[in-house]
Structures are given as structure tokens and as C-alpha cells.
């Protein structure tokens, strides 16, 4: 699944480590989600969307 | 998450305590067995089980970590690590067993727990390298 994580993160000037800390996951996890290697669970996807104050559909895109 | 997560700290403490206990019991047990007054069979059996217990704690610590990991991606990586480690161990002991059946090797599979731990360690490197 594609996502806009890298762009959203860059808009806020957050590093992967910054985002990882806010989500309480490892930086490796953020990198895996960002590069599309791993699709997060629904709870984590909601957490990410909430953090960016967006809906899930605004962050994650259909292939 | 730069600092070590609480679940990982618990895992490290459990592993360190188990391995320290194992070393103490193993050294004491072997010293007694090799002494001039070794224990009889019932006591030797108890000593063998006592020596194995900290290793059982190592397995418990590993599987407990799988339950306690809060980071879902890390949990996925660890699940892959356990599955690959188990698969490779089963391959090794199956081949070893048949080498024994065909009289190529004098003994069947030994130290299967130790093989699993070694394969689990190797699988960890592989899984995280690919991640």
C-alpha cells in the first residue's frame, strides 16, 4: 500500500526518529511503513492519521 | 524511540539472569560430578534437570518477548525469526537423523535446543538484514 508518510513528515520537518518517538514504535518500523515494506495494522494506521490530524484515506492510498 | 523499550529491558534482564544462573549451576554440577565423591544416579538426575532449568528460562524469555513486544513491526520480524530458526533446525535434525539411520554418523541428533538457539540467532541477523 502506498502512503504519504514521507511527505507529511517532511512538511513538519520531522525525522523518522521523531515520528517513531511520537508513535512509540522503532525507527525501523517507521522506515518499513514509509517504504511500503510493511502495511500497519488498523489501530496503528489510525494512530498515524490522528497524529497528522487527517483521515486514514489521506495518509494511505490504494495501489 | 531511541531509548531501550521496557519490554526489551525485561528481556535482557531475564536472559542475563538465566545465563548467569546456568553458568553457576553448570560449573558447580560438573565440579561435583568430576570430584572424588560424585553424586549417585538420583542426585545426578536432579542435577541434570536443575542445569536444564535456566536454559528453559532462556526459551521462556524469548517467547515471552514475542508476547510483550509493543511494536507490531518488530513483533512481525521476531515471528519470522522464530519460524526461520525452527525451520532450519528441523531441516538439520531431519538430515542428521537419516545420516544416522544410514550409518553415516554414529549418533542421532544431539543438543537440539542448542541448535535451535544458534539458528534463532542466525535467523535474527537474516531477518533484520532483509528488513
Image (spheres, rainbow, N blue to C red):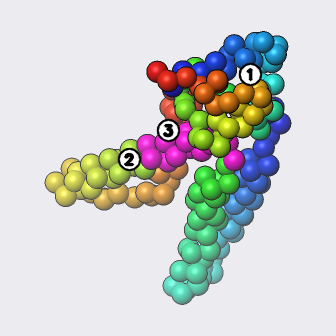
- The residue depicted at 48 percent of the width and 57 percent of the height is B113
- In this view of the protein, which residue sits in the foreground, B67 or B119? B67
Task: Evaluate whether label 3 is on the same chain as label 2.
Answer: yes
Q: Dot 1 falls on which chain?
A: A
| SS assignment at label 2 | helix
Cα separation between marks 3 and 2:
10 Å
Cα separation between marks 1 and 2:
34 Å
Residue B72 lies in magenta, yes or no?
A: yes
Q: Dot 3 falls on which chain?
A: B
> On screen, A11 above or below B97?
above
Residue B102 in the figure: left or right of residue A18: left
Q: How many marks?
A: 3
Q: Position of residue B112 (x, y in %)?
A: 43, 57
**Quadrant location of residue B101?**
bottom left
Q: Is residue A4 visible?
A: yes
Q: Dot 2 falls on which chain?
A: B
Q: Which residue is mark 1?
A: A16
Cα separation between marks 1 and 3:
26 Å
- In this view of the protein, which residue sits in the foreground, A13 or B108? A13
Is disc 3 in contact with disc 2, using a CB cutoff of under 8 Å?
no
Give the overall secondary structure of the magenta segment.
helix
Is disc 1 in contact with disc 2, using a CB cutoff of under 8 Å?
no
For marks 1 and 3, give the one nearer the viewer. 1
Q: Position of residue A14 (x, y in %)?
A: 80, 18
- The residue depicted at 75 percent of the width and 18 percent of the height is A9
Q: Which residue is mark 2?
A: B87
Q: Which mark is residue B123?
A: 3
- The residue depicted at 82 percent of the width and 13 percent of the height is A13
Q: Which range is magenta? A: B70-85
Amino acid at each position: 500500500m502506498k502512503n504519504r508518510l514521507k511527505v507529511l513528515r517532511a512538511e513538519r520537518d520531522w525525522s523518522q526518529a521523531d515520528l517513531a518517538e511520537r508513535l512509540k514504535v522503532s525507527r525501523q518500523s517507521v522506515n518499513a511503513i514509509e517504504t511500503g515494506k510493511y502495511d500497519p495494522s488498523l489501530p496503528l494506521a489510525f494512530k498515524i492519521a490522528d497524529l497528522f490530524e487527517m483521515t486514514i484515506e489521506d495518509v494511505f492510498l490504494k495501489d | 524511540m531511541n531509548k531501550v523499550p521496557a519490554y526489551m529491558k525485561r528481556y535482557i534482564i531475564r536472559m542475563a539472569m538465566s545465563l548467569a544462573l546456568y553458568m553457576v549451576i553448570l560449573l558447580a554440577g560438573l565440579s561435583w560430578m568430576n570430584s572424588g565423591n560424585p553424586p549417585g544416579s538420583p542426585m545426578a538426575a536432579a542435577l541434570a534437570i536443575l542445569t536444564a532449568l535456566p536454559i528453559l528460562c532462556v526459551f521462556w524469555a524469548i517467547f515471552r518477548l514475542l508476547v510483550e513486544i509493543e511494536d507490531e513491526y518488530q513483533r512481525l520480524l521476531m515471528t519470522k525469526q522464530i519460524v526461520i530458526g525452527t525451520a532450519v533446525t528441523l531441516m538439520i535434525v531431519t538430515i542428521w537423523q537419516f545420516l544416522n539411520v544410514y550409518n553415516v554418523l554414529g549418533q542421532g541428533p544431539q543438543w537440539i535446543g542448542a541448535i535451535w538457539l544458534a539458528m534463532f540467532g542466525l535467523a535474527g541477523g537474516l531477518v533484520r538484514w532483509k528488513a
